[in-house]
């Protein structure tokens, strides 16, 4: 069965860095685009970044450009989000999500990992 | 930046029909998607490509599109449908993705 398991969240001081991981299993990871989506406490969903199935293209929401980097290792079936220069407003639950063959939606999501940016 | 606008809340009695709208300038060119999220859980895809239903999603969930608006309809609402619902789409370049503001559906 398809599984996405995030890890790497925690409490971090403003200005510091954190790397999130999303371990995928149960499907051909290298065939799927992948997204990171976050949700601040009590707030709505916010798309963060996408990476193409082969890593050739990456796009980001404006608020994280230049600070966050999405990457993947298809040999390890793992998606990453490197987060630098963290701010209080980056505090959120971060989800990874699988993008089905183009246009068919994000059909599997991880359980989320909480990132808290606080001094 | 591109935005999708939803009503904050919809209330409906069991067995009635709930309709949630989502408006965005690029929706005539881009598909709309709908996700259901219950407290403490990850989102679940309930509609893709404006009106397609993934396997396992009950038939009471349907979607439609007209101009700059996509609509999620829940027919014969059940207590278990109480949740937050988010529309999602992309900008005209298909390189930036966005969620709607979210709608809380309350079953009276």
Image (cartoon, coloured by chain):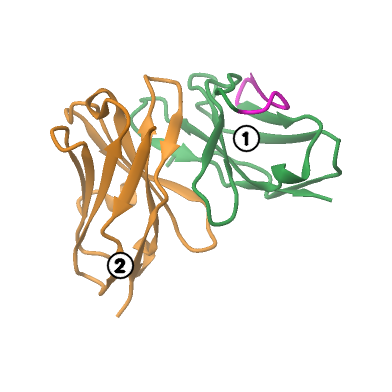
Q: Is residue B97 left or right of residue A22?
A: right
Residue A30 is inside the magenta segment: no
Left or right: residue A6 compared with residue B31: left
Image hue for chain B: green
Circle 1 crowding by C-alpha within 10 Å: few under 14, some 14–19, many from 20 = many
Residue B28 % position (x, y): 54, 20
For the point 48% across and 31% down, which residue is it? B89
Q: Chain of mark 2?
A: A
The N terminus of chain A - image quarter: top left
Q: Position of residue B27 (x, y in %)?
A: 54, 25
* Residue linked to disc 1: B22
B63 within the magenta span = yes
Work out which quarter of the rendered image holds the C terminus of chain A and state it: bottom left
| Mark 1, secondary structure of its residue | strand
Residue visible at 28% across and 55% down in the picture:
A7
Picture coordinates of residue A48, whole percent (x, y): 35, 46
Residue situated in front as seen by the camera: B26 or A7: A7
Same subunit, labels 1 and 2: the answer reads no
**Left or right: A73 as drawn, with respect to B64:** left
User: Which chain gets the orange colouring?
Assistant: A
- Using the image as rendered, state which of residue A76 and residue B97 is in the foreground: A76
- Which labelled disc corresponds to residue B105? none
Letter of the chain that mark 1 sits on in the rendering: B
Residue holding disc 2: A10
From the image, state whether disc 1 or disc 2 is nearer to you.
2
Q: Which sits in the foreground, A62 or B49?
A: B49
| Residue B5 image-quadrant placement | top right
SS of the residue at dot 2? strand
Question: Of all residues shown, which one is farthest toward the bottom?
Answer: A119
For this orientation, the residue located farthest to the front is A1
- Distance of label 1 from label 2 (alpha carbons): 34 Å
Boundaries of the magenta span = B57-68
């Amino acid at each position: 069965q398809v599984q996405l398991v995030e890890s790497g969240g925690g409490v971090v001081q403003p200005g510091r860095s954190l790397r999130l991981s999303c371990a995928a299993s149960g499907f051909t990871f290298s065939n799927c685009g992948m997204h990171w989506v976050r949700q601040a406490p009590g707030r709505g969903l916010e798309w963060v970044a996408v990476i193409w199935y082969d890593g050739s293209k990456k796009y980001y929401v404006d608020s994280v450009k230049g600070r966050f980097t999405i990457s993947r290792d298809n040999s390890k079936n793992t998606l990453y989000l490197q987060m630098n220069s963290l701010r209080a407003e980056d505090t959120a639950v971060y989800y990874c999500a699988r993008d089905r063959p183009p246009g068919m939606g994000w059909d599997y999501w991880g359980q989320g990992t909480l990132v808290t940016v606080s001094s | 930046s591109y935005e999708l606008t939803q009503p904050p809340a919809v209330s409906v009695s069991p067995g009635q029909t709930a309709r949630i709208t989502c408006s965005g300038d690029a929706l005539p060119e881009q598909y709309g998607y709908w996700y259901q999220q219950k407290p403490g859980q990850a989102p679940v895809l309930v509609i893709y490509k404006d009106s397609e239903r993934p396997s396992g999603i009950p038939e009471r969930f349907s979607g439609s599109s007209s101009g700059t608006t996509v609509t999620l309809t829940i027919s014969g609402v059940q207590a278990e449908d109480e949740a937050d619902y988010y529309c999602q789409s992309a900008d005209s370049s298909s390189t930036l993705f966005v969620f709607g503001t979210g709608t809380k559906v309350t079953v009276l």
